[in-house]
Amino acid sequence: MVKVAIVDYGMGNIGSVYNAVNHLGAKPIVATAPSKLNADKVIIPGVGAFGDGIKNLAPFIPKIREALASDIPLLGICLGSQMLFEGSDESPRTKGLSVMKGKITKIPTRLKLPHIGWNSLEIKRKACPLFRGIRDGYVYFVHSYHALPKEDMVAATTRYGCTVTASVWKRNIFGTQFHPEKSGAVGLRMLKNFLEL
Amino acid sequence: MLCRRIIPCLDCDLAVPHGRVVKGIEFKRIRYAGVPWQLAKKYYEDGADEIVFLDITASHERRGTMTDVIERASKNVFVPLAVGGGIRTIQDARKVFNAGADKVAVNTAAIKNPALVDGLARHFGSQACVVAIDAKRRYISSPGKARGKIVVKTPEGPCWYECSIYGGREFTGVDAIRWALEVEGRGAGEILLTSMDKDGTVEGYDIPLTKAVSERLSIPVIASGGCGNPWHMYEVFKKTQASAALAASIFHYETHSIKKVKNYLAKKGIKVRL
């Protein structure tokens, strides 16, 4: 059985990610300590501010780097995805994990923020294994910031008065700004794809 | 662009094991509709964009929240879950979040202690903090008769809207539109706006109320109360800036499935998730 470590660093609800992994037939492990990160896959969930996130994630970071170096697939969701980058305008003095080049910035839209609700996904890189079997569809977003990657790693976007980065992908590292665990059948399919990597 | 959301609401009576979903007529007469977590799963599979659980007995009889129901539901439902009824403190909210809820809705406790809204937004984020408002029309003979109130024109005459608490059993004198503006300022992420006049009547949403609130606020407004058929949802989306339409009875009694309602709305040009 595929063992999936869900990093529990005290930022937001990990219950729904746990339930989704469980529902898909894999074994979720709630990683409340860095020692519990030994798994086949790692998911970093999270809702909240960038600075608090990195502060709470700090004890886990060496283990996360180790997992990445040994080609373990990693999925960051929402804040978990943002923290993969070098930094964020939300907390300018805090350094991110920097495994993705670029920074997190406020969505330059004239529409209401946070961007909450179901929006359509435009898949930019069809080769991204996360989107296997998915052509398009709607996914659930809750955020005010998004990634401005320096490299060509945007895997999917959405429109919200401007183009918003919805997903990033680099080798074994995946990030979704939306919540696949709250995005119905489409989201579950993405998680299934991730678990099957 | 964002889709308009279709949200089934489960009014839960937790006095029996596993709870039961009930539907009242104008907050009074009660009928029985099913087991909460089973209905939630069914609605999820049928295309619900979000599911609201309201513990209708909590505020009144102080039964606490419905963590058990949420735990069961969240194992099978992979869209956002919102929970309301009897949430009075940050600790109450934390319990339902830990059980698997994504949002909490507060009404009575927020009116009695508005700082609760600030606290919820600070602890869990605005996206997790919904303020539910039960609004009742108070007709007036002339606009000057309602000092300090926001007067709205309705086909039945001008009125202001009064907030009710304890599930419609008590009135507060608080202007519902002003209250909505205040809680937006305090960090509420959404308003669940129920018309007490329309609730259970299946005559359609209170359009003047929904319009008045959704035009004044920048946070999403969920229209609630009165939906009797898919056209009512079309009407509220067409005539107001409501972000979501909530309904109970039309889904509970299988008069209309969520899938059919969404197909209908899509055909009429309303953007929904199919």
Image (cartoon, rainbow, N blue to C red):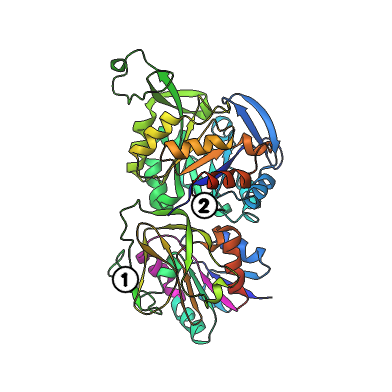
Residue B18 position, x and y percent, is 70, 43
**Nearer the observer, A112 or B16:** A112
Q: Which residue is mark 1?
A: A94
Give the crowd class for mark 1: few <14, some 14-19, many >=20 residues within 10 Å: some
Kindly report which numbered mark, 1 or 2, lies closer to the viewer in this rendering.
2
Q: Chain of mark 2?
A: B
Q: Residue at x 29, y 23 (%)?
A: B148
Residue A167: image tag:
none
Residue B128 position, x and y percent, is 46, 50
- Secondary structure beneath label 1: loop
Residue A49 sits inside the magenta stretch: yes
Confirm whether residue A30 shows in the render: yes
- The quadrant of the picture occupied by the C terminus of chain A is bottom right
Residue A115 sits inside the magenta stretch: no
**Nearer the observer, B58 or A193:** A193
Residue B88 position, x and y percent, is 48, 39
How far apart marks 1 and 2 lie (CA) works out to 27 Å
**Span of residues in magenta:** A39-60
Task: Examine the rendered structure and indicate whether residue B19 appears above or below residue B205.
Answer: below
Q: Say what amino acid the circle numbered 1 marks.
A: Thr
Residue B120 position, x and y percent, is 42, 47
- Secondary structure beneath label 2: loop
Residue B102: image tag:
2
- The quadrant of the picture occupied by the N terminus of chain A is bottom right
